[in-house]
Image (cartoon, rainbow, N blue to C red):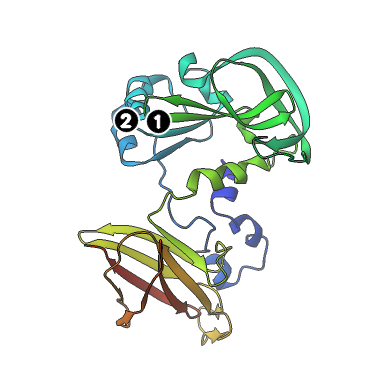
């Protein structure tokens, strides 16, 4: 769980080793934004799955009592990401593979070879389950003949299966294919992308969250950097720690407004995408409303 959250909320795992200054402790930004909720593996709560396009079975989750609900979830278009350790209780037709009971040790991995050539990426040694393919598509390989990540279509949905135990290396750190998989799962997941001015994903510069409203969406943006405030002293502000962000969407945005000042924002319409640009100052919170109806 620790390593999964270090990937999901990167770079929190990097900055936690820095001196405990206020801008390190308070709401650190993440690459993927605040898009995660934590659900319990309780059959009585299983209907909550239908509120999410992707469900990641993390840790030592128990899926035995969720079979019927998971089946309905997948057939209706949901995506389940599950590790081989938790997948043993799932029907074989959901996995598209057959476990041989053998384990191998690999020191490299490679994404799907549909784009050729792709060089193998050297990594810390890790174990991987040996399987026989029974319909699943291989998304990543441990070695040229050993799958690492597979995808099996189930109804309108799919099961993504990771075959390294808990996706950890022998050093108990996250396998490098884990952020690659997270990038793929989250690509296009939100209707509104939050990017830096240069088009790249934020890497800790800003925390963001997207919520639906009756006539569009709200995007909350928090810049926790540049503020050094002791319990009894005056805050020291580094005015250079601002961040310029771009909100990008293919939705038909009619108007954009920032609520905390408040002010109207300029909407730039391109051929296939709409952009809204704004600056978040150190310690600032801005809430942007995008009207699409």
Which residue is identified by label 1? 157
Crowd around label 2: few <14 · some 14–19 · many ≥20 (10 Å): some
Q: In this view, does 58 lie above or below 147?
A: below
- Give residue 42's quadrant in the image: top left
Q: Is residue 192 above or below residue 255?
A: above
Q: Which numbered disc, 2 or 1, marks the residue that appears first in the sequence?
A: 2
* Residue 199 rendering spot, x and y as whole percentages: 55, 66
Residue drawn at 55 percent across, 69 percent down: 205
In the rendered image, the quadrant that contains the C terminus is: bottom left
* Residue 160 rendering spot, x and y as whole percentages: 52, 31
Residue drawn at 53 percent across, 59 percent down: 30
Residue drawn at 31 percent across, 41 percent down: 51
Residue drawn at 66 percent across, 68 percent down: 19
Q: In this view, does 131 lie above or below 37?
A: above
| Residue 26 visible in the current orientation | no
Crowd around label 1: few <14 · some 14–19 · many ≥20 (10 Å): some
- Report whether 191 appears left or right of 292: right
Which element carries disc 2, helix, strand or loop? loop
Q: Is there CB contact under 8 Å for labels 2 and 1?
A: yes
In the rendered image, the quadrant that contains the N terminus is: top right
* Residue 121 rendering spot, x and y as whole percentages: 76, 41
Nearest to the observer: residue 190 or residue 272: 272
Which residue is identified by label 2? 76
State how far apart marks 2 and 1 are (Cα).
Answer: 6 Å
Which element carries disc 1, helix, strand or loop? strand
* Residue 91 rendering spot, x and y as whole percentages: 45, 15
- Report whether 286 appears left or right of 115: left
- Report whether 100 appears left or right of 239: right
Q: Disc number at residue 205?
A: none
Q: In this view, does 245 lie above or below 33?
A: below
| Residue 218 visible in the current orientation | yes
């Amino acid at each position: 769980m620790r390593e999964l959250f270090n990937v999901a909320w990167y770079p929190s795992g990097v900055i936690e080793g820095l001196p405990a200054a206020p801008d390190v402790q308070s709401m650190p930004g993440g690459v993927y934004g605040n898009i995660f909720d934590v659900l319990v593996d309780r059959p009585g709560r299983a209907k909550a799955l239908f509120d999410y396009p992707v469900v990641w079975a993390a840790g030592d989750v128990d899926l035995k009592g969720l079979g019927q609900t998971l089946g309905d979830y997948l057939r209706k278009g949901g995506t389940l990401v599950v590790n081989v350790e938790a997948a043993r209780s799932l029907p074989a037709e959901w996995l598209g593979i057959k476990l041989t009971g053998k384990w191998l040790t690999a020191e490299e991995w490679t994404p799907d070879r549909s784009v050729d050539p792709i060089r193998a990426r050297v990594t810390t040694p890790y174990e991987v389950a040996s399987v026989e393919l029974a319909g699943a598509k291989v998304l990543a390989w441990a070695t040229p003949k050993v799958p690492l990540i597979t995808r099996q279509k189930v109804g309108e949905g799919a099961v993504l299966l990771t075959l390294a135990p808990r996706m950890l290396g022998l050093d108990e750190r996250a396998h490098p294919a884990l952020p690659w998989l997270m990038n793929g799962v989250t690509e296009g997941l939100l209707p509104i992308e939050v990017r830096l001015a240069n088009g790249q994903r934020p890497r800790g510069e800003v925390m963001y969250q997207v919520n639906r409203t009756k006539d569009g969406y709200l995007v909350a943006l928090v810049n926790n950097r540049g503020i050094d405030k002791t319990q009894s002293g005056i805050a020291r502000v580094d005015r250079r720690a601002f961040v310029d962000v771009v909100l990008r969407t293919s939705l038909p945005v009619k108007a954009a407004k920032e609520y905390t000042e408040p002010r109207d924002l300029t909407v730039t319409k391109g051929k296939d995408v709409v952009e809204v640009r704004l600056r978040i100052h150190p310690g600032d919170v801005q809430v942007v409303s995008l009207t699409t109806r």
